[in-house]
């Protein structure tokens, strides 16, 4: 699971008002090189919840992202490289995601988050 994916997921349990961002606990992650596409990064930036991305990156030990970011930073090649690495090159293979409201655990196995809800949660 890329951190881009993590940034798009939320807890959809019935009655949950605050299901985002899911807290990430990564047990195993890998880095996979991906060609940098600055246009993609500039396009996706407004859709990214920055604090969630920075927190997820720190959860896997990547502390190169600033706490806050704005569109003006996209003019910096260094910022683009760090943003690209966090968003697209870090892959969580094993671990879990936790709902911030209920604490419900969603496992990540072989890079796939299991977001299926139990019958009593829908």
Image (cartoon, grey):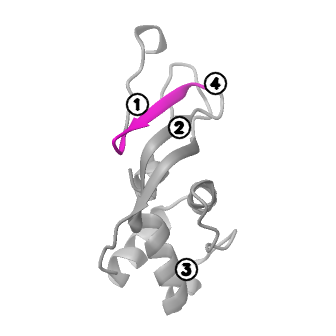
State how far apart marks 1 and 3 are (Cα): 31 Å
Identify the mark at residue 3; answer none if there is no mark. Answer: none
Say which residue label 2 marks. Answer: 97
User: Residue 116 appears at what percent x and percent y?
Assistant: 37, 25
Classify mark 3: residues with Cα within 10 Å, few (<14), some (14-19) or many (20+): few
Please name which of the two marks, 4 or 2, marks the residue nearer to the observer: 2
State how far apart marks 2 and 3 are (Cα): 28 Å
State how far apart marks 1 and 4 are (Cα): 14 Å
Q: Is residue 37 left or right of residue 86?
A: left
Magenta residue span:
102-112
Q: Of the two numbered discs 1 and 3 on the same chain, state the one appearing first in sequence.
A: 3
Classify mark 1: residues with Cα within 10 Å, few (<14), some (14-19) or many (20+): some
Say which residue label 3 marks. Answer: 71
**Mark 4 element type:** loop
Q: Is residue 118 visible?
A: yes
Q: Which residue lies at the image location 67% right of the left edge and 73% below the top edge? A: 66
User: Residue 94 appears at what percent x and percent y?
Assistant: 44, 42
Q: Is residue 21 visible?
A: no
Q: Is residue 16 above or below residue 51?
A: above
Say which residue label 1 marks. Answer: 115
In the foreground, 38 or 85: 85
Which quadrant would residue 70 be assigned to in this image?
bottom right
Q: Are marks 4 and 2 in contact (CB under 8 Å)?
A: no
**Mark 1 element type:** loop
User: Residue 105 appears at what percent x and percent y?
Assistant: 54, 27
State how far apart marks 4 and 3 are (Cα): 33 Å
């Amino acid at each position: 699971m890329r951190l881009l994916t993590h940034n798009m997921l939320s807890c959809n349990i019935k009655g949950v008002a605050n299901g985002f961002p899911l807290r990430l606990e990564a047990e195993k992650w890998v880095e996979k090189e991906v060609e940098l596409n600055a246009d993609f990064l500039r396009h996706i930036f407004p859709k990214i919840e920055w604090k969630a991305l920075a927190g997820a990156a720190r959860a896997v030990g990547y502390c190169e992202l600033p706490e806050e970011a704005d569109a003006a930073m996209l003019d910096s090649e260094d910022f683009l490289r760090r943003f690209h690495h966090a968003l697209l090159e870090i892959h969580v293979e094993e671990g879990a995601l936790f709902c911030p409201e209920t604490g419900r655990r969603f496992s990540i196995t072989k890079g796939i988050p299991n977001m299926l809800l139990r019958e009593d949660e829908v």
